[in-house]
Amino acid sequence: MQLTWTDVQDIAIELYEKFPQQDPLKVRFTDLHRWICELDEFDDDPQGSNEAILEAIQQAWIDETQ
C-alpha cells in the first residue's frame, strides 16, 4: 500500500506503530514531516504537504494513542 498526504489516518497508524512511546504533542512539524517522508510505504511529493495536513496527521496520531 502506497501512502500519500491524503492518507491521514493510515499515516497516523504507521507513525503510532513506528514510534509507540512518542508523544505526538511533543513532535515538531519539521520532525513529523521528515518521519512521514521516511515511512517505507510513503510515496508522495515531500513538498506536497502543508501545515493543515500535518495538523490533521498529528491529531489522528493523538487519537490513535488514546
Image: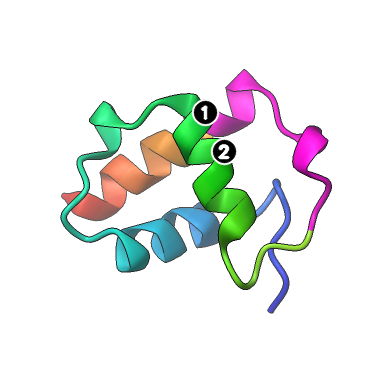
Image height of 7 relative to 57, above or below: below
Say which mark, if any, is on residue 60: none
Where is 62 relative to 49, above or below?
below
- Give the class, few, some or many, for how many residues have Cα within 10 Å of label 2's Cα (few <14, many ≥20): some
**Crowding at mark 1 (Cα within 10 Å: few <14, some 14-19, many 20+):** few
- The dot on residue 30 is 1
Mark identifier at residue 33: 2
The reply, left or right, for residue 45 in relation to residue 56 is right
Q: Which residues are magenta?
A: 44-54
* Residue found 20% across the figure and 52% down from its top: 65
- Whether 51 is among the magenta residues is yes
Amino acid at the residue labelled 2: His
Q: Answer yes or no: do the residues labelled 2 and 1 have beta carbons within 8 Å?
A: yes
| CA separation in Å, label 2 and label 1 | 5 Å
Q: Position of residue 16 (x, y in %)?
A: 32, 59
Q: What's the magenta bit mostly, secondary-structure-wise? A: helix
